[in-house]
Image: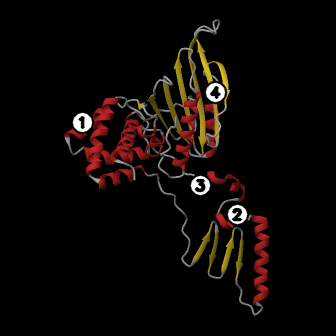
């Protein structure tokens, strides 16, 4: 179960998003639970009012998170109630009659077996062995035409090539997405998380990768001397195909970062798709030796989630690509943990 801190953080981000006009059904449910509880006290109501009046106010967000965390820590039942508000709707399945067995879209009821378009009835006959042989023959013919995968798994034959991706879940709300971004316990020694992060990100359609995404988040960090700026953006999509399209747009955007662009290899990172580039910015193109900044970015996709890792260093000293490798590898693993219903725990190893 999530800690009081993580549940409070996710709730604050959802309420801030709703106050900014980016609310969802889950956000409405979370907001109702929080308002019902905090509205009973003057400090709680004041913290709520402060964030709703200015959703981008980091001080107001911290104030609400502090009040909410205290309430959650003191009352496990409230924690469970709020956690349930984040849960996406459960899938519904069509009912099947009692006394029947349902295999995918195939059904066995009484003495009749229905396999896709084929039904076989057990007609009582003294020549039982011939009947058994006939059923087996029909089953073999059906498997050859309709596809054995449909009987065993319930998947259509054309979907059987998706492999492990079909077993992954979709991250559809802030409580699932925000923990994917590395927190203090997952960062190298000496690093920090900037105030106000991680947070939900307003994703405009014209922004690379936003089209088709269902929820997005961002975090910025205070690294050590190895790099000046670190930013991670995360986007979750409703389907794998949408995520693949988003990944392509995000990857295409990286080659426009600056001049002096070089493609990079990130061996052993993992993920379903990954790319990386290093780049340089020159304030005066006619003087290539005068470098304003250097940087490196990567994009990684795992299932229905894609992330961009952005590094930037002021001046012409270059960017430590080992940092990009380590963060990208950690993100690939953390996304993989999240989409398989595990708590993201992978750390950035430098």
Q: Is the residue under label 4 in contact with that under label 1 (CB below 8 Å)?
A: no
Q: CA distance from mark 4 to mark 2?
A: 41 Å
Q: Residues within 10 Å of mark 2 (few under 14, many from 20)?
A: some
- Mark 3: which secondary structure? helix
Q: Is the residue under label 3 in contact with that under label 1 (CB below 8 Å)?
A: no
Discs 2/3, front: 3
Mark 1 or 4 closer to N-term? 1
- x%, y% of residue 133? 79, 82
Q: Is the residue under label 4 in contact with that under label 3 (CB below 8 Å)?
A: no
Residue 74 seen in the figure: yes
Q: Which residue is mark 2?
A: 149
Residue 210 seen in the figure: no
- View extreme (bottom): residue: 126
Q: Which residue is mark 4?
A: 277
Q: CA distance from mark 1 to mark 2?
A: 57 Å
Mark 1 or 2 closer to N-term? 1
- x%, y% of residue 207? 56, 29
């Amino acid at each position: 179960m999530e800690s009081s801190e993580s549940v409070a953080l996710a709730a604050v981000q959802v309420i801030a998003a709703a106050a900014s006009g980016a609310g969802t059904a889950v956000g409405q449910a979370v907001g109702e639970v929080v308002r019902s509880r905090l509205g009973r006290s003057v400090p709680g109501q004041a913290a709520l009012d402060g964030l709703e009046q200015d959703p981008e106010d980091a001080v107001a967000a911290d104030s609400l998170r502090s009040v909410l965390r205290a309430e959650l820590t003191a009352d496990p039942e409230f924690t469970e109630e709020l956690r349930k508000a984040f849960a996406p709707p459960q899938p519904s399945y069509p009912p099947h009659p009692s006394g029947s067995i349902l295999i995918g879209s195939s059904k066995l009821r009484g003495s009749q077996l229905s396999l896709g378009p084929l039904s076989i009835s057990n007609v009582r006959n003294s020549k039982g062995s011939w009947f058994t042989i006939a059923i087996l023959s029909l089953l073999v013919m059906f498997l050859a035409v309709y596809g054995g995968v449909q009987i065993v798994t319930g998947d259509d034959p054309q979907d059987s090539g998706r492999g492990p991706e079909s077993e992954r879940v979709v991250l559809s709300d802030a409580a699932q997405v925000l923990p994917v971004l590395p927190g203090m316990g997952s960062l190298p020694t000496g690093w920090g998380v900037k105030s106000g992060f991680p947070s939900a990100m307003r994703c405009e359609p014209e922004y690379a990768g936003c089209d088709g995404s269902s929820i997005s988040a961002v975090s910025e960090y205070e690294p050590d001397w190895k790099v000046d700026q670190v930013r991670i953006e995360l986007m979750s999509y409703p389907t794998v195909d949408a995520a693949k399209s988003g990944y392509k747009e995000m990857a295409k955007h990286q080659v426009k970062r600056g001049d002096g662009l070089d493609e990079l290899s990130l061996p052993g990172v993992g993920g379903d798709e990954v790319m990386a580039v290093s780049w340089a910015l020159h304030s005066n193109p006619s003087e290539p030796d005068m470098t304003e900044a250097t940087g490196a970015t990567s994009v990684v996709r795992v299932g229905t989630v894609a992330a961009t890792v952005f590094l930037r260093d002021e001046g012409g000293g270059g960017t430590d690509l080992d940092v990009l490798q380590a963060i990208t590898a950690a993100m690939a693993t953390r996304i993989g943990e999240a989409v398989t219903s595990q708590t993201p725990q992978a750390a950035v190893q430098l």
